[in-house]
Each structure stands twice: as C-alpha cells, then as structure tokens.
Image: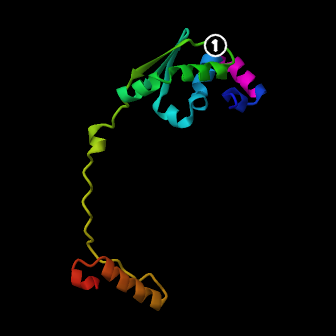
Amino acid sequence: MRAVRELLPEAMRRAMQNSLGPEEMLRACWPLVVGSRLAETARLKSLRGSLLTVSVPDAAWRSCLESMSNVLLEAANDFLGRPLYTAIRFVIETPPRAPRELRERPRPARAALSAPISADPIRDAGVRESFARSAAKYFARDPERMR
C-alpha cells in the first residue's frame, strides 16, 4: 500500500508544510489521512503536543475507533513524514441540531385560486384550447370534472 503522503506531489507537500506547519497541514489533509467517509464522522478537533484529539458523535464510534487508534496514529505520522504524535484521544461531541422551528415548520396552506387561469394570451387556437382543457382538469375542485 502506498503512503498517503505519496499522493501529493513532493513540491506541493513541502510548500504546504512550510506555509502551514505540520499541525495545520494535518488538519487540512485529514480526509486524505483517514479517508473521506471516516473524516465526516471522526473530526480532527485539536493537536496539542504529541496528542491528537478527535471528536466522534457517540460512544459506539469512540469504542470502534479506540481499537484502531494505532492505525490512525501511524497514518497521521506517516503523512507528516515523522513521528510527531504518540497518543490519540476520542471525545464525544453530538452534532448540533437545527432549531426547533426549523425542524417542525408547519406546511403552508395551499393557496386557493381566486380565478381560473386564462388561456387568452395564447395565440394558437389549438394550443389555447388544449391549455384550457388541461387547466380545467388540473384546477378542478370537483373530482368528477377531473375525468
């Protein structure tokens, strides 16, 4: 298996590391290091000394990822090209929920048509007649008229 750092051209990797530093480079490339699908759930929270802190949504994710902590540490260190991190900690952070008014919005009432749609602006007589028949069916309030 190829090292993740080999996916970036050497010049780009060096430029990123020089301008960002190893911590911000790891943060920016976290989806490359752990994979994009895992990065959606396991977010890199902080880098302090030799400790990586990763936030996960619940205890099940924490338990699963704790068993993979050595693999994640190895991937992070391999990406940077040197062993900067020796420990990883997983913290549970529930994603923020939408405000109640956004989750439980009442649906707007269906607007009643005050007047039928006019086909008068249509110049072609055949198209105008077809439109009028369709509009009568579509906007009919009586189920019998819809047939």
Q: Residue flagged by tag 1: what amino acid is it?
A: Pro
Q: Quadrant of the C terminus?
A: bottom left
Q: Residue at x 26, y 45 (%)?
A: 104
Q: Nearer the viewer, residue 125 or 70?
A: 70
Q: Quadrant of the N terminus?
A: top right
Q: Residue at x 61, y 31 (%)?
A: 32
Colour mapping:
rainbow
Q: Is residue 36 above or below residue 80?
A: below
Q: Position of residue 42 (x, y in %)?
A: 47, 28
Q: Is residue 41 above or below residue 68?
A: below
The quadrant holding residue 90 is top left
Q: Is residue 137 left or right of residue 131?
A: left
Q: Nearer the viewer, residue 105 or 32?
A: 32
Residue farthest to the bottom, as pictured: 125
Q: Residue at x 77, y 26 (%)?
A: 10
Q: Which residues are magenta?
A: 12-21
Secondary structure under badge 1?
A: loop
Residue farthest to the right, as pictured: 11
Residue named by callout 1: 83
Task: Look at the image and tell me whether residue 58 can be seen.
Answer: no
Q: Position of residue 62 (x, y in %)?
A: 41, 25
Q: Is residue 43 left or right of residue 99?
A: right
In the image, is residue 17 part of the stretch drawn in magenta?
yes
Q: Nearer the viewer, residue 138 or 45?
A: 45
Q: Residue at x 31, y 43 (%)?
A: 102
Q: Is residue 24 left or right of residue 81?
A: left
Q: Position of residue 74 (x, y in %)?
A: 60, 20
Q: Position of residue 96 (x, y in %)?
A: 36, 31
In the image, is residue 98 part of the stretch drawn in magenta?
no
Q: Nearer the viewer, residue 100 or 129?
A: 100
